[in-house]
Image: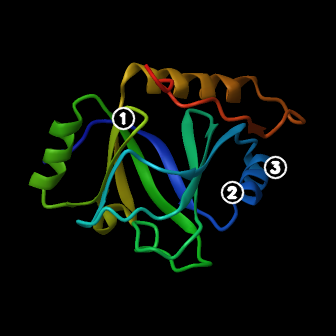
């Protein structure tokens, strides 16, 4: 049974230091520029039946057509990251798939016997981390594709296409969408 015909849009890594990882990937691969979301919080959150959120920061950038995400967990609260790596360890964590019908895609993975490890809603987007470690050695993130998110990703990819060595490797954060009060 084919679960998904969607291409991976993202690969993600748990790292000990966002800025150091950004610099290394930029020097080695010319990845970036990167957008950092420090101490990211979500409006709705569930991890293995609890609502306890770990303190994490994210960095997002492109390498060719692939989004690269770095995740740094600042505490030892149980999380999908600590399920794979102890404090001080780092490595590949998940691949991401953009989905239009989030509920349908989520159910398809459940019906195939995979567990939903974590679900969240932030910035107007549903996301779920499916425990697919038995297949790919990591999680699979299902990520909704509303127009404002696709627009952000397209801008970040275009910034990568225009990036030249010597340009800033970190882009100042643009306020989240939709703006507060709308």
Q: Nearer the viewer, residue 76 or 106?
A: 76
Residue hosting label 3: 27
Which residue reaches farthest left? Answer: 111
> Which of the two discs, 2 and 3, labels the residue nearer the N terminus?
2
Which residue, given by chain and number where applicable, does mark 1 sit on?
125
User: Residue drawn 77% across and 56% down?
Assistant: 24
Q: CA distance from mark 2 to mark 1?
A: 23 Å
Q: Residues within 10 Å of mark 1 (few under 14, many from 20)?
A: some
Give x and y (percent) for residue 61. Answer: 63, 40
Res. 129 in view: no
Q: State the SS at label 3.
A: helix
Q: Is residue 166 left or right of residue 57?
A: right
Marks 1 and 3: which is nearer the front?
A: 1
Residue bearing mark 2: 18
Q: Which of the two marks, 2 or 1, is nearer to us in this view?
A: 1
Estimate the x, y position of residue 17 in percent, counting from the top left.
70, 63
Residue at image position (73%, 46%) is 29
- Where residue 158 appears, as percent x and y from the top left, is 64, 22
- In the figure, residue 19 lies in which quadrant? bottom right
Q: How many marks?
A: 3
């Amino acid at each position: 049974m084919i679960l998904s015909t969607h291409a991976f849009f993202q690969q993600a890594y748990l790292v000990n230091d966002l800025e150091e990882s950004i610099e290394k990937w930029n020097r080695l691969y010319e990845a970036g520029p990167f957008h950092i979301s420090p101490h990211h919080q979500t409006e709705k959150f569930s991890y293995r039946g609890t609502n306890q959120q770990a303190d994490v920061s994210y960095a997002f950038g492109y390498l060719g057509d692939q989004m690269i995400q770095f995740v740094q967990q600042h505490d030892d609260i149980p999380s999908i990251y600590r399920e794979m790596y102890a404090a001080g360890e780092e490595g590949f964590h998940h691949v991401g798939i953009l989905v239009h019908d989030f509920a349908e895609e989520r159910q398809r993975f459940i019906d195939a016997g995979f567990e939903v490890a974590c679900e969240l809603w932030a910035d107007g987007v549903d996301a779920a981390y499916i425990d697919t470690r038995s297949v790919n050695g990591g999680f699979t993130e299902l990520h909704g594709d509303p127009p404002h998110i696709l627009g952000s990703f397209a801008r970040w990819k275009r910034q990568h296409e225009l990036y030249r060595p010597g340009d800033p490797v970190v882009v100042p954060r643009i306020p989240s969408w939709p703006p507060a009060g709308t």
